[in-house]
Amino acid sequence: MYDHVTFWEVPVETALFFETAEEIYARVFRSFRPRTALPAITVHYRRYANANSRIRLYNGCLQVSISDLLEPAPAPVQEALATILLAKLFRTQPDRQVLDLYHRYLNRAEVRRTLQMAKKERGRKIIGDARGEVFDLKVLFAELNQLYFAGGLSEPRLGWSLRPSKSTLGHYDPAHNVIVLSKVLDSNKAPELIVRYVLFHEMLHLQHPTEHHGTRRCVHTKAFKEAEKIFIGYQAAREILAKFVAS
């Protein structure tokens, strides 16, 4: 659909001059529903903390809310987003080329920096204290830091999640420099080995940041996976963790 090499060269002001955002959504809407009467369309750029966008068809009006962080995006990217949102609305799958175009834009280094800064400045990260009912994350972090990283990691903000979850046992948020472990692990039913393993896994993200290659986003690189295997009791921890999650 688009020349992935040259469309970036089109000045933003020139690209957006030809169509308003509403006109883009009207044109894309017709491509999905050529025989349906065109609804009234409103497109608003909102001060979101990320690149989230929302769409809904309500009372004959197509309402679109887009992160203001995407407002400077070139027209082809705006059209790709319109296609993705309308495909979601009509419960169909957008073309892979459209998805790749949009994700290539989000993966551009300067766009990633903008999104991360906005998340840090606008977003709120509400977590529990590092000292839980059973385990103290600060104590465990210090021990693991000495054992596996020679004390070289700077301690990020540490805390337990507000709600227990077995689907997400832990995560590292680079925008807020915080490691959060699921409250489900702060329990006498959770062996300390798996708590240490999950925390160690998240600590590795401090040493092995996410890599971006075109549309690909690699969170667990080859180096990350190799480093994870040095955890003492690695295989046992994974097996126990699998049983814990399944219980």
Image (cartoon, rainbow, N blue to C red):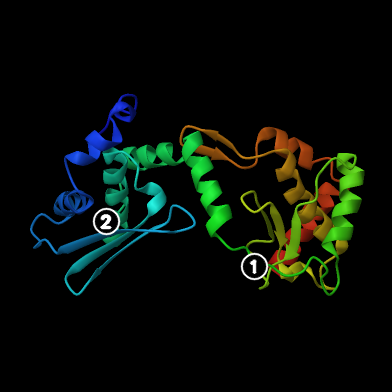
Would residue 107 be visible to someone looking at this image?
no
Which residue is at a point 44% across and 59% down the rendered structure image? Answer: 48
Q: Position of residue 171 (x, y in %)?
A: 67, 55
Q: Position of residue 195 (x, y in %)?
A: 81, 60
Q: Mark 2 sits on what residue?
A: 86
In front: 75, or 229? Answer: 75
Q: Which kind of residue does numbered mark 1 sit on? A: Ile
Q: Is residue 3 left or right of residue 184?
A: left
In front: 138, or 163? Answer: 138
Q: Which mark is residue 152?
A: none
Which residue is at a point 59% across and 63% down the rendered structure image? Answer: 124
From the image, state whether disc 1 or disc 2 is nearer to you: 1
Q: Is residue 62 left or right of residue 73?
A: left
Q: Position of residue 133 (x, y in %)?
A: 83, 75
Which residue is at a point 55% across and 48% down the rendered structure image? Answer: 117
Q: Quadrant of the C terminus?
A: bottom right
Between the C-alphas of marks 1 and 2, the distance is 32 Å
Q: Is residue 194 left or right of residue 98?
A: right
Q: Is residue 166 left or right of residue 118?
A: right
Q: Mark 1 sits on what residue?
A: 126
